[in-house]
Image: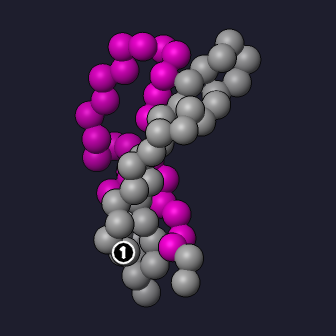
Amino acid sequence: MENFLLVISLWGYNGLDWEYIGNQYVYNIPMSQVQCINIADESSWTRWENNKLYRMSLECVEKDS
């Protein structure tokens, strides 16, 4: 069943907690949960994070029916 979307969101650290800052990208082509998890697997990506106060998150979100 193809009902998951890949969401890439941006987070900021306020000194105590990580907070969603309101920016995100959504890959709007539905896929299976397994496909989405394979794409979102961090071992498949190369990261360069030079600013310790910001980071991106990859998540698989179930699409509303």
Q: Which residue is mark 1?
A: 31
Q: Is residue 38 visible?
A: no
Q: What residue type is disc 1 on?
A: Met
Residue 45 in which image quadrant: top left
> Magenta stretch: residue 25 in it?
no
Location of residue 48 (image quadrant): top left
Q: Which residues are magenta?
A: 38-63
Q: Quadrant of the C terminus?
A: bottom right
Q: Residue at x 46, y 78 (%)?
A: 3
* Residue found farthest to the front: 22
**At 56% from the left edge and 76% from the top edge, which residue is drawn?**
64
Q: Position of residue 57 (x, y in %)?
A: 47, 41
- Compared to residue 14, the image places residue 36 above or below, namely below
| Residue 39 place in picture, x, y as percent | 33, 57
Residue 4 can be seen in this image: yes
Q: Residue furthest bottom?
A: 1
Q: Position of residue 12 (x, y in %)?
A: 56, 24
Q: Quadrant of the N terminus?
A: bottom left
Against 46, residue 42 (above or below) is below
Q: Residue at x 34, y 43 (%)?
A: 43
**At 39% from the left edge and 49% from the top edge, which residue is drawn?**
25
* Horizontal arrangement in the rendering, residue 32 relative to residue 64 (left or right): left
